[in-house]
Structure formats: C-alpha cells, structure tokens
Amino acid sequence: MNEQSQWTQQVKALLDASAHDLDAATLSRLNRARQAALAQRRKAARRWFIPAGLASACALALAVAIWHGRAGAPPPAQGDVVALAANADDADVGADDDDFYADLDFYAWLDAQGQEPPG
Amino acid sequence: MVVTMPTIPVHPVEWDRASVESLAEHTLDEFLKSVERRALRMAELATLNRDEALDLVQDAMFGFVRHYAAKPAADWAPLFYRVLDSRLHDWHRRRQVRSRWLAAWLHDPQDAGIDAIAQAPDVSDPGPLLRLAGSEAARALDAALAKLPLRQRQAFLLRVWEGFDVAATAAAMRCSQGSVKTHLSRALTALRRELEDYA
C-alpha cells in the first residue's frame, strides 16, 4: 500500500468515525426526515390513484353501456340468417320480375304476331 | 434407492400491488439509511451548523424521493448526492447574498453596534461531530475540509469517502470528469498541506 493510499485510508477512517458517532437526537431527526420523505412518496402515489381510478371507472361504465346496448337488440338466430340471405336473393330476382311484368304487353303482342297470319 | 426430485412451483409467485409498493419502500428506506449519516457530515462540513445540515439533508431526501425514486436502485447514490450537491449550492448562494447585505450594513455607521463577523460561523471551528470524535487528527481534518471550496470538498468526499468513480462523481456534481480530476487534485494538495503533521 503506497503512502497516498495509506493517507486516504486514514482520512476515510476518521470520516467514518465522525459519521458513526452521531448522538441520539441527531439520529432521531434523520429518522424523522427519512420517514417524512417516504410518507410524501406514499401521498404522491395516492394522488395518482384517484385519476387512474376515475379513468378505469369511466372505461368500465362505457364498456357496460356498450354491452347493454348490444344486449337490447338480440343477435339474429341461425334460421333468421338463412332467411335474410334468401330475402337478399329474392330481392335480386324481384328486380328481374319487375322488368318481366313491365314487358308483358310486348310479349302478348309478340305472341299474337306469331299466331296470326301476316296481313 | 429413491431419488426425490425437488418440487418446482407450478405457478410463479404473484405479487400484488401492495407487496410491490411495500418492497420498493423498504428498499428506498434502506438506501436512505445507508447514505444519511455521510450526507449529514457533508452538509455539516459545508454549513458548519448541524441544524442547517439536517434541514439540507431532509430537503435532499425529499427531492430525491420526488424525482429519482423511480430510477433503478443502482443509480440512486449518485442521484441522491446530486440533489444534495444542488441543495448545498443553493445554501451557499443564499449565504453569499446574506453576507453581502451584512457587509453593506457593517459600513453603515448606524449599525456599527452589530458585529456580523462575530455572528458568522467560524471556518476553523471543528464542529460538534468532530468534538465527539475527540481526536486531534479528526479535528484537524474537519477544519481542513471546511476550508476547502465547496466543489473541491465535494469532489474529495464523493471520490475518496463515498468511493464513487470519476464518472459517478461527475454525475453527482453535474460537471465533466476533467473538472472532477482538477477539483480532486487541488483538494488533495490542499489537504496534504494542511494535514502534513498527521500524514
């Protein structure tokens, strides 16, 4: 161990001794200061819980409202789904039928033309 | 021969929030306990007044818990001393302003009766802690440390006493590593000169 290192070790030992030999009143004040700092941390954590709790409650309420809204209009049963699909097909067929019925006069005329001899 | 296999828990231990908070607070409490005495000594060497030193340490604890408690525990020590260093600088600035006012009043013949110098703390006073330590060498060290400029004293105490490396000391003092080396070199020279009888 060189001289510099020995010297710093002595200095460290002296400083350690001075920090170790604190009286009870000082230690008590240090303890109170530490507890106060930790209490402030707990208080700060509680301050965050309030808005976080409110946000969670709002999200829960929104989820429940959406769920109730869906529950009010029951989902279609399997048969209804098939019927709905069939109706959709019918709707397309119905469009063709409309054309057919509109052209009935034309078909009647065409038929008559085919049965009567050309005059 | 029957070999019993060690049972491995199927489910990991589940920590609820309260347990995690309690553990974090316990860790923080232990850390503050581990630094509070040295922090008090540093503050006392800067202020030469125990009450003011205790107030500064309490402020440093509050500031550290408020701003840095969420940081990884491995980084806490330099961060705590950074807060303390900041408080010590603030205290010195306030004291300088007060000293200027006191100096101005001293020149006022109406206030000639007030001896401001007598009321200011004596730099050569070893302080109550080293009186408790009771050794002449300790007293001389205390006086020599108190004579150092704040930056030199902090560099010395953090590097030599606290055992920080140069980078951590620079982080705590908010300066470059080169500055730490300069402050430390000057502090060592001054202390060796002051304490040559005890070296």
Image (cartoon, coloured by chain):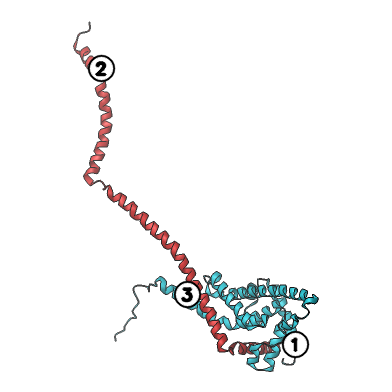
Image colour for chain B is: cyan
Disc 1 sits on a residue from what chain?
A: B
Chain displayed in red: A
Q: In this view, does A18 lie above or below B72?
A: below
| Amino acid type at mark 1 | Glu
Task: Return the x and y of residue B174 as percentages of the image width and height.
Answer: 65, 71
| Nearest to viewer (mark 2 / mark 3) | 3
* Residue pointed to by mark 2: A106
Find disc 3 in the rendering and name its residue: B24
Mark 3 is on which residue type? Ala
- Residue A115, numbered circle: none
Q: In this view, does A117 lie above or below B79?
A: above
Locate residue B139, reporting x and y percent: 69, 90
Q: As drawn, which residue projects farthest toward the bottom?
A: B135
Q: Do labels 2 and 3 share a chain?
A: no
Q: How far apart are labels 2 and 1 at the CA level?
A: 126 Å
In whole angstroms, how far apart are the C-alphas of marks 2 and 3?
91 Å
- Tell me the residue at 51%/72% (across/down): A40
Work out which quarter of the rendered image holds the N terminus of chain B and state it: bottom left
Residue at the image point whose x is 54% and y is 70% from the top = B66
